Amino acid sequence: MQLDGNVPGGPVAQKWDRHRFELKLVNPANKRKFDIIVVGTGLAGGSASAALAELGYNVKTFCIQDSPRRAHSIAAQGGINAAKNYTNEGDSIWRLFYDTVKGGDFRAREANVYRLAQISNNIIDQCVALGVPFARDYGGLLANRSFGGSQVSRTFYARGQTGQQLLLGAYSAMMRQVAAGKVQIYPRREMLELVVAGGQARGIVVRNLVTGQLEKHMAHAVVLCTGGYGNVYFLSTNAMASNVSATYKCYRRGAFFANPCFTQIHPTCIPVHGTYQSKLTLMSESLRNDGRVWVPKNAGDSRPPSQIPESDRDYYLENKYPSFGNLVPRDVASRNAKEQCDQGKGVGETGLAVYLDFADAIARDGRDLIARKYGNLFQMYEKITGEDPYETPMMIYPAVHYTMGGLWVDYNLMSTIDGLFVLGEANFSDHGANRLGASALMQGLADGFFVIPYTIGGYIAGSSFAEITTDHPAFKDAAAEAGQRIQKLLSVDGRRTVDDFHRHLGLIMWDHCGMARNNGDLGKVRSLIQELRAEFWENVTVPGVERDFNQSLERAGRVADFMEFAELMIVDALDRQESCGGHFNEAYQSEENEAMRDDEHFSHVSAWEFTGEGSETNFHKEPLVFENVELATRSYK
Amino acid sequence: MTKSITLTLKVWRQQDPQSRGRLETYEARDISTDMSFLEMLDVVNEQLTLEGREPIAFDHDCREGICGTCGAVVNGRPHGPEKGTTLCQLHMRHFSDGDTIVIEPWRARAFALIKDLAVDRGALDRLIRAGGYISANTGGAPDGNNILVPQETAELAMDAAACIGCGACVAACPNASAMLFVGAKVSHLALLPQGHPEAAARATAMVREMDRLGFGNCGNERECEAECPKEIKITNIARLNREFLKARFFSSVR
Amino acid sequence: MNWFVQTVTSSVGKKAMMAITGLGFCLFLAAHLAGNLTIYGGRQAFNAYADHLHSLEPLVKVAEFGLLFFAAVHVITGLVLFYQNFAARPSRYAVTSSAGGRSIGSRTMPYTGIFLLGFVLYHLLNFHFVDKTGTTIYDIVSGAFENPATVAVYVCAMIVAAIHVSHGFWSAFQTLGANHPKYMPLIRGVGLVFSLLVGLGFGLLPVYLLAVS
């Protein structure tokens, strides 16, 4: 089946205006008659809750954390893009649109990306009004920096904590609506099921993580803002609780999952230390502006870096990409690091790291200047590793960072289930096969503040809703399913811990569906996942009881979903016989190891439909048409 | 250099708010000094799970020191002995082989205990709800550059806004006061021109809510400042005092 | 509730009352100390100072009632704060350790305060509510300090007072909102010097009188 993205007609620059006019409106007096559930309180969920409540809807907002202020958007460091052109460098909405489509390796929907670029300016204005303390120039105007290899300085930032400040801005706007009685917050709740009644998403079943009780919540629409699934790899820069469960449960209820194999690997993370490692820490890629990446020329060279002379060092990025050098895009830098380590040239105790050396920069600019630019990053690195980057080169290695795939949504951000809207990282829509730096924050807030308030109105005004309560059979069935699954997890009583299984799954995914993928491996790995999943259900041990604050049980449920979802990623990766952005299939590369897209056959969104336990998932295609940005091959030579 | 150490842990275990809690002793063997404190607890929990015992409940999420979820009092120090560090960023290289470590939850009347080391910090959300925001509906904001904010002011506001809401200030305060938390938010918004219109109402409402929630009174003991993982200064508390007194005596807010 | 009552019964309001009354006591201490230094001038000087004070009778009465009112506010508010702060942490830590914020002054504030309340009552009974007919204040004072035990009590009390003031002085400024990176070091310095002056100035007087007796 071909999917229709419901993109409005007309020139790309006028689509959003036109669409907003064409969308039906809900009478202001009637808005209070409609309940909306928002799941997740990151940038997308927080801003959506606030904006919808401001319009008059009754909003119920759920989050897994103990407070809505802790969603993982908070960890974003770098900044947020906007096409303000405050720096007079010739930036424009069109240029931001163009860069984002190209950076996404031509696998995003043009109309969505254009809208994102248009809205980007309103986001900055709104956030300033909310009191986000963006960096300022001496005269008091907003400051910008260049980010992620962009040719113009369009990134707004608040030190290295932009995500935190934007999230707290959205959170404060939402808390104001809590005070106004328009938003009700349900913290420490995990969504376990979506409730679909009469073909419409009408509610959710959540587990109260403190009491362990299942709760049923009814609404007229459900807005999912539950983030990405990077933790399928166990080790990632995601927070510990980040998971795929909410989106995966919606997939099982009929929402299509789009491009699950598109994952972004960030090149500058602190390397893995040992098997106990629970997560990876990202360091801003701005480090590559001054740091030089190198490995020893000879495999197995175990001398400390200070004793390796220049002649025995290989500055492989500078040698291979003379014009971009250490500043090649994330995916290229990541793949090259892996390549070096695969050749046995990796450094550190595990051999899975490369050096990022500031010695030359310190010699050139002086220690003070380097400290001013990167002091907090150096401090963070030292805190974690115990090594001083002023004295000895940093060690870095790529880590899973962001997932471009997500639930398929149309131009209105509605999934294939009526009334189920998906925002932020949880949907697939704007970043194609690769996300540019400082674009995730932009998308989360765009979706929440400026898209969903209009499109949800169009849906509500154009739909009729049956009068139902949480006693409806659909609620009862969903709650029963959730309860049974919990009982099943608790009753296995095996000998391996949840984390042990998760780590195992993560290794399989990292080795075979990580930075580089090959058809042979992908073919085999599906059965590995199936075997691991079978073992999980026979041999996992989940201590404690259902009606309690039981963190092992929480994790068990999430890992069980990752086990199923991982297979979907493999199916998607195998299906996409090309290399693009975050998906690098070794069979499709140029002689210089660059990714080779196949626009003739794969210029589409792959959307997968659940067809039942144990049966093959159904493939759907949304063709991508590029009318405004010419298809081109990326080159960084 | 990576070393392996063995520690004796005395951990507060308490099934629920009603039951009595106590310190239980566990041995943490073969702990790599490269581990973070929470990874050390993970290892202990894996062991407990395999022994059929219930693992220690503790809150944590981002594990990079920004979400504010984690926190426990380690040998009497919130977030442990390192300055400007959250518990997740505390690494075991700061401990020695054979050390005994006492781990307790945040203790304050306003933070009800949930289980073991996990507490309910909903009171901090209620403080923000009381007025820790600027009333600006979505859509009507003027261009960001229409509001000039001197760089120094922006930096000061950012210093205050860096608060991660972990509650260590309350845990560290001998009086379990939330003045640093409230002071940071009131300062952040009072410093920025955008926050001026509501400054008086905000300071009044937040202090009132703080008193209602059962936090203690500030005694200027400065333990909050010394323990804050983001090193937020008590000048923010002074600014809160100023804003509050100004609001009470020189504004029309009742 | 009336806005004023609401303000002074709030946590910040109570602290502000402590700060204002506390600073009032600091002023009183300074004046009291200046007057007492006349003791070093001998019997005549001291008695002349006392007589001069008595000649300002109506003013002194106002000051006395003012001090009494300040004391009532300071003591009652202090006790309320002490109770509230205790109640704010119903279950205590098994291990407590300071990160370096607390000082001996801040740590002991309520206790030194209660001690000083007792001392002030004792002091007033000794020198204020005594029969002064047929004698001079100098004789009463020097007579009292012939007893080494009394001297010891006074010296101890002055050490306690110095500790109390060492935290109270800068803390009052902080509570009233006067903390500025430029001036705070000065305020802290003045507070320390002032507490030393109080401790030494008042503490040495009884010792001196004991020595010359």
Image (cartoon, rainbow, N blue to C red):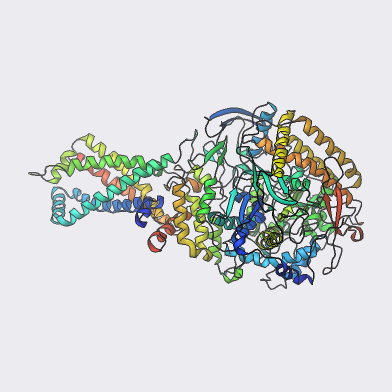
Furthest toward the left, the residue is C134
Answer left or right for A295 relative to A33: right
Answer left or right for C105 relative to C210: right
Relative to A235, say whether A363 is above or below. Answer: below
In depth, the one of B218 and A601 nearer the eye is A601
Residue A99 coordinates in the image, percent (x, y): 77, 65
Disc count in the image? 0
Answer left or right for C132 relative to A147: left
The quadrant the N terminus of chain B occupies is top right
Relative to A537, say whether A97 is above or below. Answer: below
Answer left or right for B157 relative to C169: right
Furthest toward the top, the residue is B51
In depth, the one of A78 and B251 nearer the eye is B251
The quadrant the C terminus of chain B occupies is bottom left
Q: Quadrant of residue A243?
A: top right
In depth, the one of C156 and B137 nearer the eye is B137
Q: Is residue B95 visible?
A: yes
Residue A93 coordinates in the image, percent (x, y): 73, 70
Q: Quadrant of residue B249?
A: bottom left
Residue A158 coordinates in the image, percent (x, y): 62, 59
Q: Is residue A341 visible?
A: no
Relative to A313, say whether A142 is above or below. Answer: below
Residue drawn where x is 23% and y is 38% of the image: C151
In depth, the one of A607 and C149 nearer the eye is A607
Residue C50 coordinates in the image, percent (x, y): 15, 51
Residue drawn where x is 11% and y is 46% of the image: C136
